[in-house]
Amino acid sequence: MPARSARLRTLAIAGAAATALLFPTVTLSGSAQATDEPTFKPQLIKVKTPSRGAKTRLQKLGLDLTEHAGHKYVEVVAHSQEELDLLTERGFTYTVEIENLIRRSMEVAELNEAYAASVDGSPLPSGQETYRTLKDYEADMKALADEHPGLVERFALKRKTLDGKTVHGVEISQGVDKPNRGEPTFLLMGLHHAREWPSGELAMEFAIDLAQSFGTDDRITQLLKRARVIVVPVVNPDGFDLSRTDGEFVDLRALNPNDPLGGSTSILATPGNAYKRKNCRVRDGEDTPDGTCRAFSSNSPGGYGVGTDLNRNYGGFWGGPGASDLFADPTYRGAKAFSEPETKNIKDLVTDRQVTMVISNHTFSNLVLRPNGVAPSTIGQDGLPVGDAPDEGALKRLGAKMTAQNGYQNIHGWQLYDTTGTTEDYTYNATGGFGYTFEIGANEFHPPYPEVVDEYLGAGDYEGKGNREAYLVALEHAVDRRFSGVLTGRAPKGATIRLSKEFRSPTWEGSFKDGLDTPIKVRRDGTFSWIVNPSTRPVVESRTYQDLSDEPFEKEVIEGMTPEPSGHKDHEYVLEQGADLWRTELDWPTPDDMDLEVYRKNADGSLTEVGSSGNFVGDKEKVEIPNAEAGTYVIRVINFASVSPTYTLT
Ligand code: 0X9
Ligand code: ZN
């Protein structure tokens, strides 16, 4: 495949009407350089969050959180001065990591150009030298299928995007053009989030790699005889196209043949969508004329306000913690579960075949994340702590096998912050097929391209391994019979039989009609052998906790005086004996917001957080600690935004 190089874009638009549509907030000026850049440039900042509770409070501010977070911080994209002011007002402190993300995008584009000029093809399977555009992905998928008939097929997903684009994927398997005869599927996806460019690159490279290696590499050949691999490199083409092409500089001289600038040059950074995250939903329940997403996105800071967060729109516990119901928020969950065509597309893929392994690529923070999306102590729909996934042990072991290849951290999704409605929380709970999020890369949403090369092939201690090997481990899992069932039998030759199942999938507060329906073709010898996911879905598997009684064996009530807004009050509490379940409830008379955190007091006086509850405004707080040990604890009451003078701890 031909290698390409990045070029700073010159926009050629005929006529002033187009100008007004594209840049409604920009005033032109005749100065020589960059004076028309929007005054506030998006920044990457590192916000201090000393506890999990602080993280939850930060999450409630509706800011654009990244997955780059440690025990004591979360990195955030700040899109306006108001957001920085809000942080300070709420008592958060931060340091600036990247001061001007638009300028950084420019630097990255220049570095990519320099890299492309310095190499004659990268060591990637395709030789790719810089980030693909949407057009490049389309061309590469088509070329791959054309070059490998019978091994690679390009297909269109069922629903077009809101902007009228067709989403494509490639399916790779020996005899891919023949009907499925019971092979399991590994689904690899990229670019749910528009700005996370490496997530699509690595998916596309893996597809190319598999096709090239079939017939020469024995391990890959064997795997492609037993499994089907589906790669959807760009799940969100509307968002990605904007992010990839609208974050650069525009040469204004091209806008008007009469040259309103009196012959001077003006280079302008567009408000830009380079850091757009979501899809192109403009208003719930409404479609917009095809091709207009760009115009609607240009009047929101950094383009991030518009859209639904596809990674909060899946059905799995949709509408719960870590997802917002406010349209302008970065984690807007959408009007209902699967309200967006892009998430429905993926749902269709996992419900009409046996997908035994899922990886959804994102950037960044070098993580392999496994279900669940919310902490085990979170109280679920049935009033019990959600606990760990029933397959926690096996999910963790497979995570470790993959992180041994890419050097990432192997952790739960919830360990950084809570999420609901994410891809793998739905696919795992609906099918039992294991699912992971990969957060690729160390520091940026779309770093200089050589880092993409390293992330795929591995570098340093992981040279020769990297995500290429991690994906192969995933593909091996997809065909591992210890994790699937096998249905065998006889049926009329060439007949199609179906495995169907109807059920309801839980959202956070209800459920929706759901089901799986896999067709399979009987072999010419009249037999079938069909690899399938477990018949019991994880979501209905028995709970870890059993309720023996509604009444606690001991109960205590503490009244307290509310601290100042943003302040907190600590209650030292001695738990005299261990308890199967220790529940602390915080109540107050007004409909506003307090939060609750529980710490264990260590021998040296330091505190370790063991539970927290930071519900949205109006909801009261509850922390449940399963298997609580006797000892000294600190119960912390935080006034997030409450006017009540008193509170009650039970
Ligand atoms: O928040 C997300 O959707 C993902 N991170 S990103 O920075 N790429 O947006 C993580 C989703 C799964 N992870 C968690 N449950 N934390
Ligand atoms: Zn993401």
Image (cartoon, helix red, strand yellow):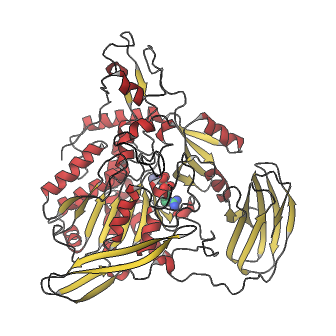
Question: Which of the two residues, 116 or 92, is positioned nearer the viewer here?
Answer: 92
Question: Extreme top residue here?
Answer: 262
Foreground residue, 151 or 381?
A: 381
**Residue 241 visible to an observer of this rendering:** yes
Instruction: Report the front residue among 255 and 626.
Output: 255
Residue drawn at point x = 30 percent, y = 24 percent = 14
**Residue depicted at 24% across the width and 48% down the height:** 138
Residue 72 pos. (x, y %): 62, 53
- Report whether 164 appears left or right of 635: left
Image coordinates of residue 239 in percent, x first then y, are 39, 45
In the image, 621: left or right of 351? right
Q: Is residue 548 above or below residue 37?
A: below
- Residue 36 lies, with reference to residue 516, above or below; the image says above
Q: Is residue 182 visible?
A: no
Is residue 183 found left or right of 446 in the rendered image?
A: left
Q: Residue furthest bottom?
A: 490
Residue name at image x 38 percent, y 32 percent: 248
Q: Quadrant of residue 469?
A: bottom left
Q: Quadrant of the C terminus?
A: bottom right
Give the image location of residue 243, x and y in percent.
Answer: 39, 41
Q: How many marks?
A: 0
Tell me residue 177's x, y (percent).
Answer: 16, 67
